[in-house]
Amino acid sequence: MNTLLYVVSALTVMFTVLAIPVALAFAVHSRTEYDHGPDCWFCHPRLPRIRR
């Protein structure tokens, strides 16, 4: 049980450490006054399309 608790705790801490700067960057980016348009990769990510 100690190993499982350690792994879950480590994953939670890593997620929190990564989520805080991402949330701050998202908040700062979304509050900019100019319109970044469709070329903004943060607002409009280019996802790979599946070819059929």
Image (spheres, rainbow, N blue to C red):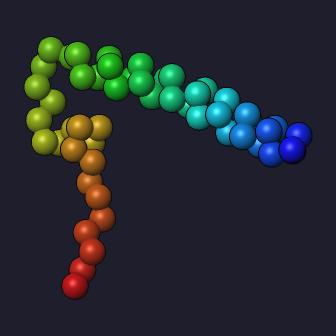
Q: Position of residue 43 (x, y in %)?
A: 23, 37
Q: To which quarter of the image does residue 51 belong?
A: bottom left
Q: Position of residue 36 (x, y in %)?
A: 15, 30
The residue lying furthest to the right in this view is: 2
| Residue at horizontal 45 percent and vertical 28 percent from the top | 22
The residue lying furthest to the bottom in this view is: 52
Which quadrant would the N terminus be assigned to in this image?
top right
Residue 44 to residue 10: above or below: below
| Residue at horizontal 24 percent and vertical 22 percent from the top | 30
| Residue at horizontal 88 percent and vertical 40 percent from the top | 2
Q: To which quarter of the image does residue 10 belong?
A: top right
Question: Number of callouts in the render?
Answer: 0
Residue 19 to residue 46: above or below: above
The residue lying furthest to the front in this view is: 1
On screen, residue 10 versus residue 36, left or right, reads right
On screen, residue 8 versus residue 3, left or right, reads left
| Residue at horizontal 80 percent and vertical 45 percent from the top | 4
On screen, residue 44 versus residue 3, left or right, reads left
Which quadrant would the C terminus be assigned to in this image?
bottom left
| Relative depth, front residue between 46 and 5 | 5
On screen, residue 34 versus residue 14, left or right, reads left
Q: Position of residue 25 (x, y in %)?
A: 39, 23
Q: Position of residue 44 (x, y in %)?
A: 21, 44
Q: To which quarter of the image does residue 15 belong?
A: top right
